[in-house]
Image (cartoon, helix red, strand yellow):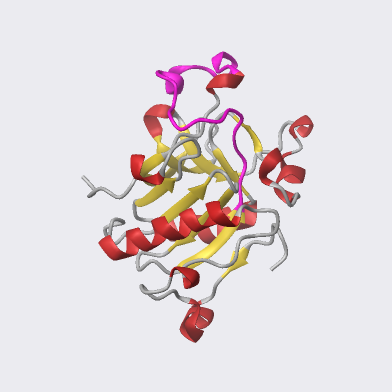
Amino acid sequence: MPARTILYLTAAGLALGLAFPQSSLASVLPRPPDGRDAAVWSAAGEVTAWIRETADNQGLPFLIVDKVNAQVLAFDPEGRLLGTAPALLGLARGDVSPPGVGDRPLSAIGPGDRITPAGRFVASMGENLGGKGILWIDYAAALSLHAVITTRPADRRLQRLATATPLDNRISFGCVNVPVRFYEEVVQPAFNGTVGIVYILPESGPLADVFFSAPD
């Protein structure tokens, strides 16, 4: 599969065996996109396997956001892969939202505070202040996933999504930007009428610092 190509798995494809069995991590995810770190990509597979084995998603659709590889993976409530897409993430690296960041205007969020935090979040569809549809990940921290914003041409967000490397995908104030087609054809249908879970993988510490405990 070429780098940056959004992967859509149809019901027919899943019936042909594209759904992954519990026993094989190799079948949990497609191979890493070109330019992506295979060792880190396996972390997404590890978390996916844990979710399936423990039913941590509690019968809800879920997303995994792999910050290091700048990828989002979408799954149905049974843990079947619906699709993957490149993502734009917070400009600053880190795994914890700065205190009170959700109460600040964008102009008051400095470059070092533009973090996409790691964690397990209960997410739901909603709207931003402009009335556009988004997936709220953490309302208090003003953290959401939405279709890529292109209002500032200087940001080159579409071009960043199209490159084969994740190194230029850090541009947002913390929110996760994904291609419009992926948002409209995968995320919205999966989360419409229900809440779901978003797992954002850490980039500065081990997975066990964030995951692998029983859900609240």
Depicted 132 relative to depicted 40: above or below = above
Q: Work out whether residue 188 can be spotted.
A: no
Instruction: Name the quarter where the C terminus is drawn.
Output: top left
The x, y position of residue 137, in whole percent, is 42, 40
Quadrant the N terminus occupies: bottom right
Name the side, left or right, on which 92 lies relative to 165: left
Q: Position of residue 27 (x, y in %)?
A: 48, 72
Taking the image as shown, residue 185 lies to the left or right of residue 200, namely right
- For this orientation, the residue located farthest to the bottom is 16
- Does 84 sit left or right of 25 as displayed? right
Read off the magenta span.
Answer: 86-110
Task: State the residue at coordinates (45%, 54%).
Answer: 63
Tell me where residue 212 appears, x and y as whole percent: 30, 50
Q: Is residue 68 magenta?
A: no
Residue 96 lies in the magenta-colored region: yes
Residue 93 coordinates in the image, percent (x, y): 56, 31
- Asked which quadrant contains residue 119, the reply is top left
- How many dots with numbers? 0
Residue 190 position (above or below residue 161): below
